[in-house]
Amino acid sequence: MKKNYYIFLVFQLQFLISPCIAQNRVIDSLKVILKNAKHDTTRCNVLNAMIEVESNDAIWPKYNEQLKSISEKNLKLHPSNSILFKMYLKYSALAFNNLGYLAEIKGDISNAIGNYIKSLKISEKIEDKIGIGYILNNIGFLYLDQGEIAKAKEYTFKSLKLYKETNTKNGIAYALNTLGLIYIKNNEANKGLECFTNSLKIREEINDKFGISVSLNNIADFYNSEGKFALALEYSSKSLKITEELGDKRGIAYLLNNIAALHLNQKNYNIALGYSINSMKLSKELGYPSNIKNAANILTKIYKGKNDYKNALLNYELFIQMRDSISNEETKKASIKSQLKYEYEKKAAADSVKVAEEKKLTTVKFKHEQNQRYFLYGGLGLTVLFGIFMFNRFRITQKQKSIIEQQKTIVEMQKHIVEEKQKEIIDSIRYAKRIQQSLMPTEKFIERILNKK
């Protein structure tokens, strides 16, 4: 398992380092680029590449500290909604993931899972599916080392799903490799071999030499468990050759011990002893409990097979000491506590989001109901105003009607008076006419008078 497996960031620099084949030449080229870099984003990118290329576990953590320092500095300088802020969060996640790996190989499981979870939270925040996949796989591998098979499988399957969604080939190969180890540990050897073989094919396609070495070694372990020692030795030797080319001391120590175990199984004690002593020497030089534990375990069995019980006992005591430092109950409790804390915080965050959404929905609903009430009150107010207006209009109309009727009555009365006066005048005229007519002689009278003359 490598530091962070963000190989795609290394590929971004290939155009600058492709002529450099040897590891030290690559590192030298990257150091020149780092020295001449004008922007912190370039520095972070180069530092990450140096972490990946550097196999010396005493050196690359220094590059990681620089990566962490630069990313933390820039997170304080840039707005949280900017692209640069998101980019430096990604570098911060890388740095925490690397710290988790460093703690893991030193046997500090509590710090390992703590840093992995910090890295996971950041990657989830920026929705970096590839980053989440790598960290989930690292946590799965960590649980596998602790013998927590169910947890290891859970995290590894989540990781594999994300790799497939993003079509990340080196990630798929990495997850398949971890899954193969889980199947082997769970007594499902055939499934394990299938995973290792598929992982190897992908790694050969993308020319991932470190990954090829890991897959070859795992296939060797499978054949060893099946009693096919010749095949196991063949694959282990291929793996060791590639690891030596890469200069990966920790990998070399691990593979030397594996080859020692193969010879031990065939009772080739002297050959096994040579490989195992070299493994122990390199493991102590590196100072990693996991490697020392494995070497001590094989040396115990070799010395026992050679009837050298004194050295067998010394190495057995060392094996117990290293084993307990890696997987004691307190360490397991600490890792479980850390995991439960993360899951609780994640659930709490999800619940808070849910509550916020419900609150938002309630607020919208309340506002909608409030608006409806306002509309209702407004409608009622308009209705009342309209009613008052209509009532006033009615009163005015009635008043006008009353005035009109009064005026009509007056007019009718005046008309009646006029008619009465008119009748009186007409009657007077008629009466005067009758008087005049009575005073005037009739036509016959006049005619008689005229005839007499």
Image: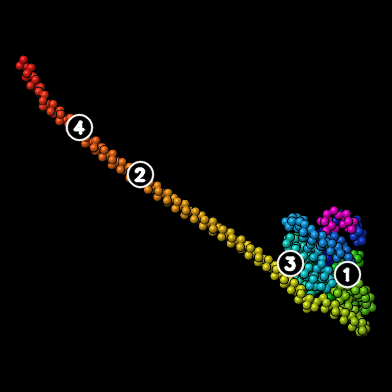
Picture coordinates of residue 343 (x, y %)? 71, 70
- The Cα–Cα distance between marks 2 and 3, rounded to whole angstroms, is 88 Å
At numbered mark 2, what does the secondary structure look like: helix, strand or loop?
helix
Residue bearing the label numbered 4:
425
Q: Residues within 10 Å of mark 4 (few under 14, many from 20)?
A: few
Q: Residues within 10 Å of mark 2 (few under 14, many from 20)?
A: few
- The Cα–Cα distance between marks 3 and 1, rounded to whole angstroms, is 28 Å
Is the Cβ of the residue at disc 1 closer than 8 Å to that at disc 4? no
Query: Which is the main secondary structure of the residues drawn in magenta?
Result: helix
Instruction: Pick whichever of labels 1 and 4 is earlier in the sequence.
Output: 1
Q: Quadrant of residue 369?
A: bottom right
Picture coordinates of residue 171 (x, y %)? 79, 63
- Side of 114 relative to 418 (left or right): right
Q: Quadrant of residue 411?
A: top left
At numbered mark 1, what does the secondary structure look like: helix, strand or loop?
helix
At numbered mark 4, what does the secondary structure look like: helix, strand or loop?
helix
Residue bearing the label numbered 2:
400
